[in-house]
Each structure stands twice: as structure tokens, then as C-alpha cells.
Image (cartoon, helix red, strand yellow):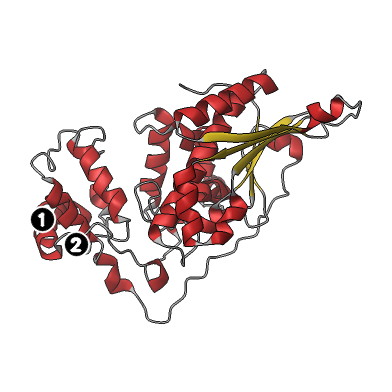
Amino acid sequence: MLKQLMATALLVGLSLPAWSADMANGQRINKSCALCHGSHGQGASGKLSPRIAGLPKEYLIKAMKDYVEGTRVYPLMVRTSQIDKFTEADYRDVAAYLSSLDLSSDEMFNISSRIGGEVDEGKDIFNSDCKNCHNRDGYGKASKEAPPLAGQHPEYLYTTMRNFKQKTRIHANDEEDDTFEDYTDPDFINLTAYLATLDDKRIVPGYAFEPPLYRPSFARPSRDQLDDKIQITDIKQTVVRMALDKDVTTEMAEEAMIAKAEEIGLKKVAQQKVSQFLARQDVEMPHLSIFQFCNPLDARLMVIADPVFSSYMPCRISMVEDGEGKLWLMMLNLDMLINSKMMPAEVIETAIRVNQQMLDVMAAGASGKSGS
């Protein structure tokens, strides 16, 4: 009997690490999430970049798996984040890391509404239709599988609620839910106006959020172990690179990128085939081509906000061959704009959209398919 108890205790003890989150791994994985959601998961104003920091672990895991399984559809996110290649431990680790990031006490991350609305009328709607599942304070109820609404960007909430009304998104815990069926557009706007006030109560004057820093307890993977994954450099996430899929040629990648750019409203303004140019002069070098894209109206908005942004223009993607003969697509990441607290909201929103468009172009090139 004693031996059985000791064996059971040993097995339990050995199983514990499998269920505990590796926060350093979660921090590493979050570098890919940060491409669109910011380095702290703070998101940004607008409908493209929701806040994922501080959301419940179980909700984050379910959301990621929903995208992988096609319940929620956003192929670019799956490609750039590589969540379809996650292990169960990866899901737990990144969810635990993001869930631990509490931005609600820092006034710099306070949510505000840019779309107007009547707060008092929104409060009445919330108390009538939302409070039961999402809690009186708007921070959700685990027992109802209801995530926080407080602290989420209003434009994203507005778009999401309209999707629920149009049945392009379904409540996970109640597929027959018809809460939004009779909502008018002013109802949505008023509700988001009220929700934008709910995180105000958690602000602590003078408090400044400091992200935790976790050191990995394992050796860094070698380059050949990373070849099939999107990579973010460690220098303030300055560069994003993505390997071409097997059997995708440079010609296929070029055609797919140009087609995708045209499809989403980006103009190819220049192209330099550096290695081809040098080859005509009998100078050998690994493959290097540079493609430049621009949307003139987006460029105008950003330069008016700050002429320094012109240094990012036009947006560039390089196709380069490394020393081992592997082809990569690389681009500068606009994460410094996404993470900025000083930029006007419309500029940050534009930067996120442009960043996602360029990732879309890069993903098309890596797969050799524009999707059009």
C-alpha cells in the first residue's frame, strides 16, 4: 500500500510541470501576436486590433483554436501567428502570458470612444441585456464563458456586435442567441460609449505598467529548426521575415505579391532586381529583389501627422536568399507605430491596416498564391 501511495505521489508530482505555463515561451510567442496587437497586447483604436491583454486564459485558448478550426475566419492571422502549428503547451503558455498583462490601472492605456454615443442610454442597454453574462463591472464571468467588454476598443466592439446581429459571428455559449436582433445602429453606438467608461474605475493615478520579463529555461532553437516559421528579430521587433513555402519559385512569389497588392489597393511603385542586375555584369551574389508598395492616401495622412513617417515609405518587401540557399521574404515592421501612445488614433489605425496589408502581401508571396 505504501509503495502504491509513493508511486501515485511521484506520478502526480511529475505531471504538474505539464500543466504549468512556461511564461518565457508565452512571451516569445507573443512577438508574433504583437505584429497586430502591440507588444503588450494592448491593441489600438479601430476595428482591426482588439486588446488581448488581460483576457481570460480559457477564452484566449478557445479563440485561437476557433481560428485554426475555421469557426472564426482570418487566414492572415493564422499564417502570421502560426497558431495552426501550436502544441497544447504553446496555447497555454501564450494565453497565460497575455492574461497576466493587466493594463487597466495605467491611464496611458485607458480606453476612450471616438464614435460618440449617449453613455446613459448605453448603460440602460447594458444593464438590461449584457450584465447577466458579462458581469456588473463589464469584466466578464468565467462561469458564463463571457469575456470582458470593459477595456476593449469601442470600434472593435461595435463591429463585433454588428457581426453578431448579422449572424456572421455566433455566441459560443448560445448559438440561438438573438440579443442584437432588434438593435439599431444608435443602440450599438450608445452601448459602446458606456462600455468605454467601465475601465476608468481601475485607473491608479501615477501608476505605470511595466511588462514582466521572463528568461527562457531552454536553449534557443537552431536556425534550421526555425526555417518554416515566421520570425521576428529581437531588435525591438524591427524586422519580420517569412520563408517561401516548398516548391514556390521566385517568379511565383513575385506574381502572387503583386496580384495581392493590387487586390487590396496597394500600388507597386518600384522594384529592384539587384542580383539579376549584377548577374548581367558577371557578378555573382545570392538572390535579392526588392519590392516597394504604397497607398498615396495613407501616405498623405501619416506624413501630415509627422514627416518622420516618410522614412518608412514606400513600404518594402525584400526577397533574399540566405547562405544556405533558402529564400525569405522580409519587411520592416510598423510595431513602433502600433505601440506608440503619442500618435493620433487615426494614424495608429492606418499604421495597423498598412502593416496587416503588407503581411498579407508577404503571406501571398510565401505561399505563391494571391488568393484572388
272 displayed left or right of 21? right
Q: Position of residue 212 (x, y in %)?
A: 55, 65
Residue at (46% x, 67% y) in the render: 342
| Residue that numbered label 2 is attached to | 194
The C terminus, quarter of image: top left
Disc 1 is placed on an element classified as helix
Residue picked out by circle 1: 125
Say whether disc 1 or disc 2 marks the residue closer to the N-terminus.
1
Residue in the foreground of this view, choosing between 112 and 104 = 112
Farthest right residue? Answer: 282
| Residue plotted at (48% across, 55% down) | 302
**Amino acid residing under circle 1:** Ile
Residue farthest to the bottom, as pictured: 206
Does residue 85 show up?
no
Q: Position of residue 294 (x, y in %)?
A: 53, 41
Q: At x 86% / y 31%, what residue is drawn?
A: 285
Q: Is residue 33 visible?
A: yes
Check disc 2 and give the amino acid type. Answer: Tyr
